[in-house]
Image (tube, rainbow, N blue to C red):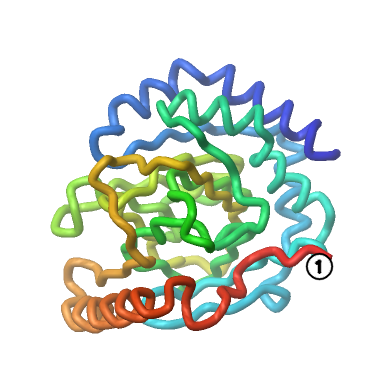
Amino acid sequence: MDRKEIRDLLYKSIIDNTKNIQNQYNLSKDKIGYFYIDEVFPLELANRIFEKFPKITEAVKKKNLREFKYTAYQMNKYDNLLEEVIYAFQDEKIIELIAEICGLKSVYADESLYAGGLSLMEKDNFLNPHLDNSHDKNLNNWRVLNLLYYVTPNWNLDNGGNLELWPKGLSDKPLIIVSKFNRLVVMTTHQKSWHSVSKVLKNEVRCCVSNYYFSDFPVLNSDQFHVTTFRGRPKERLIDFLLQIDNNLRKSLRKLFKKGIRENPHQYKKS
């Protein structure tokens, strides 16, 4: 299937669920606006997407105090279906529909897949509470939406590796959204949208297709520039202390070097 065929299936799925997802978003938009849709694609296509995912050994490992996961973004190295799926989410028809649901204007996707693409998490992988980088790689546009499409069959709450939203801040319990097979989660990104991924507990790989949308305008009028900002979990006091030092150091470096000391390698370099 090509991206236009996949786009049409995605569009229909969103339209068919508009009332439900609009309600989800309206109820949550004052904190971290989000919605999710289950059974996004026909079962056969969802299974094919999972089957075509690269192996852990074919992905880029990221392991530090902030996170432990694997990413893949140089899409011409992998099965063509995966690239078609990613860019189906970037079709203007899809962007306009989701932007309308979320009440956002001047929204567009990022063809370079800066920080997007494919995400893989195996046993003991995690992603600590964090705020996404406020801008795109050139610091021109605001990051406003995060789209996460999960494709590992039979994934349930007990597996871990689930999305956590912290709408009341890190001192309260998070809202857990299971990384359920064939589920799409859309969430706003701004200076209060703390989110994380719980540690994977099962000896399986959680696979996710990730996209970001950007805009000329921030979600919140109070939004300010910030680097990707990590914190420890409520009981991880030492880790939280070290991560705050790390945040301040990286923030200071960005003030000196507006686009970073080096180019972020996490982007799709097309030939």
Quadrant of the rendering where the N terminus is positioned:
top right
Q: On the rendered structure, is 80 left or right of 102?
A: right
List the residue tagged with mark 1: 77
Q: What residue type is labelled 1?
A: Lys
Q: Is residue 227 above or below residue 64?
A: above
Q: Nearer the viewer, residue 101 or 67?
A: 101
Q: Nearer the viewer, residue 22 or 103?
A: 103
Which residue shows up at 66% across the image and 58% down it?
112
Residue 213 seen in this snapshot: yes
Q: Nearer the viewer, residue 115 or 232?
A: 115
- Expressed as whole percent of the image width and height from the top left, the position of residue 33 reads 34, 37
Which residue shows up at 76% across the image and 61% down it?
75
Residue 159 seen in this snapshot: no
Residue 42: name its quadrant.
top right
Density class for disc 1 (Cα within 10 Å; few <14, some 14-19, many ≥20) is few
- Expressed as whole percent of the image width and height from the top left, the position of residue 151 reads 63, 49
Label 1 residue SS: helix
